């Protein structure tokens, strides 16, 4: 339990400038003072809808972008204070798997070259023989055959391509893999294979995953812990099982209710889902215009992440809602 | 008994292959749909589900060759010339596509895109058609319809674009709507809203809906009946609740088990081994036999016939009688 976190994100913010060609420049806050930690050897899910900042978070954790303020400590080191050279060396410890297994593999390179490519950035990059051995071992680890190294990506199905992308991410034996919608484009039968692979890699090799998706069921199936994001902020976090069994934020509950389920037939008996325009959240809670529990206080005072009273069940759980206690009472409905 | 709105009989589609010859894709497709009915078509990539919806729309590419009949209100679409098809398309059949951004014209306001069909097909004036477009945008629950009708697609969110796509398809008051993965690109809350809109249209306007999706949850939510396709063949058909709670085909069972859900500590998701075969490399006998957990030697002997174990229920599997009995 007391192992230091592999990833320690502190008050991370990222503003993007928009407009400016005509009229005034505006800044959009894609990420707002987000703090979280990820323990080694776990799958940490991040869920949220488009525009919630989850991909911005992925880019910052991968050091592909710099924050406006805040820090990302990886394995004890502040990524944005490292020299360019040190950062490059550090990159072998964190890798990324992208959403589209068709766009992320160079069609003119053999699978062997694609998977071996990250090895070239290593200091004292291994020789040709060792490279080939490591590629073969890695292809086997993700459920492909060593002989596949000589083929080109077009010869593989979507699920196989995503395995190739995972093999490429793992070839430097990274401690952290950031997977941004890594299974969203896959067919159901193949998606389950790839999700099992991620759990195997966590259990056998101790790989840590930051698993970003909009699909709650997928996170529920594989993640140890989960963070729910809304408009650049973390609104709820905790053990995945507990969060989905009993959400402590009305937004998490809205997501869970909206997700289609193979055991629910016909139109659900729920009030129509509110899809409201985003509101300016300089003050107050940014979810208040969609929230069935909102009161006057939500418009004036921003809810910060906090824990609730309630014994061991509430341990390790955080919610950013003034009225989260309402969700604990089974008789209170929103 | 009113005649069905759509009757697909013994449809087969093959495609010219690069090496000469023709590659069969869809075989032995049979579908009946009445007004106001909802049919879900489930299938993974490579199942032929998109080719089937293109065939119903009369949009098959020149390399595709169809045999059999597709009867819409008694008229065979496969026997029609392009001019006649053009009237059917749009006026009787509407289509909603998966990716609403590529389906819209970026250089035209959304109001004009909705109005265009009304001007061309119905002979409305642009002024009247634009007014109608605003009404349609209102109907798909677009806030501020009048103002948004003058916006260009790039200014809209994904959910708003998909609602524009629905409004375009609705403008002609089609009797049949085909929606090919209409919510796959959308967030869950926006998806729920778009599904509610489609649901209202089938209830209130008596529109029939064919919804093509790989998401079994969406099918359960939307469709009274479900057809499961694999490798261009019907594997199973029936009332959605029956198909998803008491599946008769091992492929349907495999799909249902692969739906992601929480596992016991250290547990793993159930999978279907292997991958969907290409049409040129199907196993002998049953097309699912190389991945099927319940395979027996007889499965390789020949393609199983389509059987009807109960009224309204169909399955292609020689072991289905055992599943029915259990």
Image (cartoon, coloured by chain):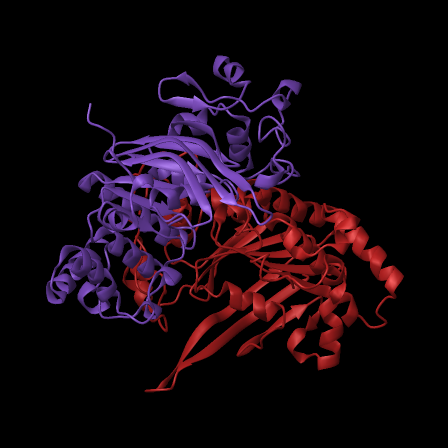
Left/right placement of residue A194 relative to residue A48 reads right
Give above or below for B157 relative to A66. above
**Along the line of sight, the residue nearer the viewer: A166 or A314:** A166
Give above or below for A127 relative to B8. below
**Along the line of sight, the residue nearer the viewer: A38 or A63:** A63
**Along the line of sight, the residue nearer the viewer: A330 or A47:** A47
At a point 70% along the width and 79% down the height, the residue shown is A82
At a point 58% along the width and 62% down the height, the residue shown is A103
Asked whether the viewer can see residue A261, the reply is: no
The chain drawn in red is A
Q: Residue furthest front?
A: B20
Q: Residue furthest top?
A: B325
Give above or below for A288 relative to A241. below
Left/right placement of residue B59 relative to residue B15 reads left
Residue A275, percent from left and from top? 31, 57
At a point 71% along the width and 54% down the height, the residue shown is A207
Quadrant in which the N terminus of chain B appears: top left
At a point 41% along the width and 28% down the height, the residue shown is B237
Residue A234, percent from left and from top? 48, 62
Asked whether the viewer can see residue B102, the reply is: yes
Q: In which quarter of the image is residue A83?
A: bottom right
Left/right placement of residue B277 relative to residue A249 reads right
Residue B73, percent from left and from top? 23, 35
The chain drawn in purple is B
**Along the line of sight, the residue nearer the viewer: B302 or A112:** B302
Left/right placement of residue B310 relative to residue B14 reads left
Residue B43, percent from left and from top? 48, 39
């Amino acid at each position: 339990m007391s192992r230091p976190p592999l990833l320690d994100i502190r008050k991370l913010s990222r503003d993007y400038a928009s407009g400016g060609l005509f009229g005034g420049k505006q800044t959009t806050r894609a990420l707002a003072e987000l703090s979280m930690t990820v323990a080694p050897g776990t799958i940490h899910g991040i869920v949220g809808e488009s525009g919630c900042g989850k991909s911005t978070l992925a880019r910052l954790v991968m050091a592909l972008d710099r924050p406006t303020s805040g820090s990302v400590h990886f394995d004890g080191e502040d990524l944005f204070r490292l020299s360019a050279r040190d950062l490059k060396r550090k990159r072998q410890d964190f890798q990324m798997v992208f959403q589209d297994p068709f766009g992320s593999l160079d069609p003119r390179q053999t699978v062997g070259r694609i998977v071996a490519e990250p090895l070239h950035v290593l200091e004292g990059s291994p020789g040709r023989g060792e490279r080939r051995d490591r590629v073969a071992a890695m292809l086997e680890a993700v459920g492909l055959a060593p002989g596949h190294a000589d083929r080109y990506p077009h010869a593989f199905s979507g699920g196989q391509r995503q395995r190739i992308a995972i093999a490429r991410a793992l070839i430097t034996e990274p401690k952290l893999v950031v997977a941004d919608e890594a299974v969203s484009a896959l067919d159901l039968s193949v998606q389950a294979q790839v999700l099992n692979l991620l759990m195997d890699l966590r259990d056998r090799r101790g790989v840590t995953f930051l698993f970003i998706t909009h699909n709650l069921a997928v996170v529920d199936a594989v993640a140890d812990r989960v963070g729910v994001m809304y408009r650049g902020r973390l609104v709820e976090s905790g053990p995945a099982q507990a969060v989905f069994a009993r959400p402590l934020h009305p937004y998490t509950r809205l997501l869970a209710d909206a997700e289609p389920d193979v055991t629910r037939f016909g139109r659900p008996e729920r009030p129509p889902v509110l899809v409201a325009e985003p509101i300016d959240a300089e003050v107050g809670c940014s979810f208040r215009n969609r929230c069935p529990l909102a009161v006057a206080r939500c418009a004036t005072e921003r809810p910060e992440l906090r824990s609730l009273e309630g014994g061991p069940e509430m341990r390790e759980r955080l919610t950013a809602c003034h009225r989260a206690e309402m969700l604990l009472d089974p008789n209170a409905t929103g | 008994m009113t005649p069905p709105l759509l009757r697909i009989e013994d449809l087969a589609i093959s495609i010219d292959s690069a090496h000469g010859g023709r590659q069969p894709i869809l075989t032995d497709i049979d579908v009946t749909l009445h007004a106001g009915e909802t049919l879900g078509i489930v299938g993974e990539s490579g199942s032929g589900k998109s080719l089937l919806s293109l065939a119903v729309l009369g949009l098959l590419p020149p390399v595709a060759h169809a045999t059999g009949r597709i009867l819409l209100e008694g008229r065979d679409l496969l026997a029609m010339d392009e001019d006649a098809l053009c009237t059917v398309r749009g006026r009787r059949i509407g289509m909603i596509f998966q990716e609403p951004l590529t389906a819209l014209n970026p250089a035209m306001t959304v109001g004009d895109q909705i109005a265009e069909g009304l001007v061309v097909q119905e002979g409305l004036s642009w002024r009247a058609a634009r007014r109608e477009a605003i009404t349609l945008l209102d109907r798909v629950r677009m806030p501020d319809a009048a103002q948004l009708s003058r916006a260009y697609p790039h200014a809209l969110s994904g959910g708003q674009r998909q609602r524009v796509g629905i409004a375009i398809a609705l403008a002609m008051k089609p009797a049949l709507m085909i929606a090919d993965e209409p919510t796959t690109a959308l967030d869950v809350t926006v998806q729920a809203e778009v599904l509610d809109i489609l649901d209202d249209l089938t209830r209130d306007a008596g529109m029939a809906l064919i919804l093509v999706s790989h998401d079994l949850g969406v099918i359960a939510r939307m469709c009274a009946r479900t057809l499961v396709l694999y490798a261009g063949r019907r594997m199973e058909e029936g009332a959605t609740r029956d198909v998803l709670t008491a599946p008769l085909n091992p492929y349907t069972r495999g799909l249902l088990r692969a739906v992601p859900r929480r596992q016991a500590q250290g547990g793993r998701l159930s999978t279907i081994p292997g991958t969907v075969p290409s049409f040129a490399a199907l196993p002998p006998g049953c097309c699912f036999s190389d991945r099927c957990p319940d395979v027996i030697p007889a499965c390789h002997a020949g393609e199983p016939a389509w059987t009807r174990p109960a009224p309204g229920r169909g399955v292609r599997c020689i072991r289905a009688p055992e599943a029915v009995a259990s």
